[in-house]
Amino acid sequence: MTPDTRRWIEADKAHGWHPFTPQDAWTAPGHEPLVIVRGEGAWLWDSEGRRYLDGNSSIWTNIHGHGHPAINAAIRRQLDQIAHSSYLGFANPRASELAARLAGLFPPGTLERVFFSDDGSTAMEVALKMAIQYRLQTGEPARTRFAAFHNAYHGDTMGAASLGGVSRFFDRFRRFGMPVDFVAGLDQLEALDPASLAAVVIEPLIQGVNEMRPWPAGMLRGLRDWCDRHGVHLVLDEVMTGFGRTGAMFACQREDVIPDFLCLAKGLTGGYLPLAATLTTAGVYDAFRGDPGNAFYYGHSYTANPLGCAAALASLDLFEQEDTLPRLQPEIRRMGELLAGLAGHPRVREVRQCGYIAGIELAEGLGEATCLAARRHGLLTRPIRDTLVLMPPLCTRGGELEQAVEAIRRSLPA
């Protein structure tokens, strides 16, 4: 171990606090965390010079690869002008351009308004608070509940956490959050009183933290129809699925669904900087006009920060310049072929895929150990319980994808 690596690890263990991590195990004398120091394309390097394929896109964020020259240049250009200015009481060029670009990704007259925030959790907080305030300001004060789905994950701030269906993460905080009715599927919504609901919230096409479990085909379309029949808003959490992960720019487009609120983060800046957006309709926006007391009194210090907006605009440009989505389609098929070969392994229980997202469910107790073993074969990823996530940057190509799957195969016990 180099002196720099040792110094960084010692400082980390003495003063850091990592998310979703039992700290006794992390700070144990025998544990040597990887210190990531560099990235290029789909690859990462640690402080000891070892190279790894970024198998989960640095927690589902990176889209076009690390160190992409176009995004780097856009950030540098913006940095030469200004790094940050307040969006409270002021506008900035990049935020104006990005709002227009995001709205332009949907049909005219649909998602016309963009409220910026910081991350996936705050994008959800925006949608939840807007949904409630909308009802209070349109003569429906009884509609203050939400419907969400078992095993869902929508973030960790208090409002977003109350919609989470993973007991380990959220049960201790449940009584402090939003009023929520949990259902297992579309059929169970019929048992609820729709007159009490402000909105239904869902991860479209696939649940992420629920070990990468896809929804049945047509489920999202059916949910949109149910919401329309009962006057309930539909909130889509596309924090994970947005920006090409499912093979379309947004998962909802695969079933021709337009929500009332669309929450975006993670890949919005190509995985470079914290930035989130909540898109909604003119009908929702209009309920916050008129009386100054109707305004949406919510925001963050770095909302619409120019650096993040510059990165996001460059990322959207790359989708067009590099034909990202058309070029991704054969890679999605190749992923399916490679995973089909892995599915027959005696330690693999099930392989689940949605676009360029995959979950490989292993026999009980093998998740963490297999991910650690995969490092020796040049792959970095994390398990969700015993399900390995394979969600590389969209720039990953066939040969690299083959290396990732082979690393998993070689890491499984016989």
Image: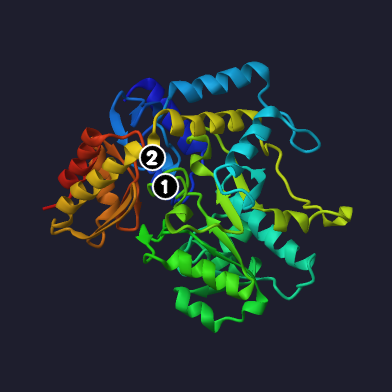
Q: Rate crowding at label 2 as few (under 14), some (14 to 19) or many (20 or more) other CA atoms within 10 Å.
A: some
Which residue is found at the position 51% from the left and 59% from the top?
257
Q: Residue at x 49, y 66 (%)?
A: 165
- Seen at 53% across and 66% down, the residue is 224
Query: Contact, CB < 8 Å: mark 1 with mark 2?
Result: yes
Is 134 situated left or right of 152 in this image?
right
Q: Is residue 122 visible?
A: no
Of residues 122 and 214, the one drawn nearer to the viewer in this rendering: 214
Q: Residue furthest right?
A: 291
Q: Position of residue 293 (x, y in %)?
A: 87, 56
Q: Amino acid at mark 1?
A: Ala
As rendered, which of 3 and 331 lies closer to the eye?
331
Q: Which amino acid is tagged 2? A: Leu
Here the colouring is rainbow
Find disc 1 in the rendering and name its residue. Answer: 248
Disc 2: which residue:
325
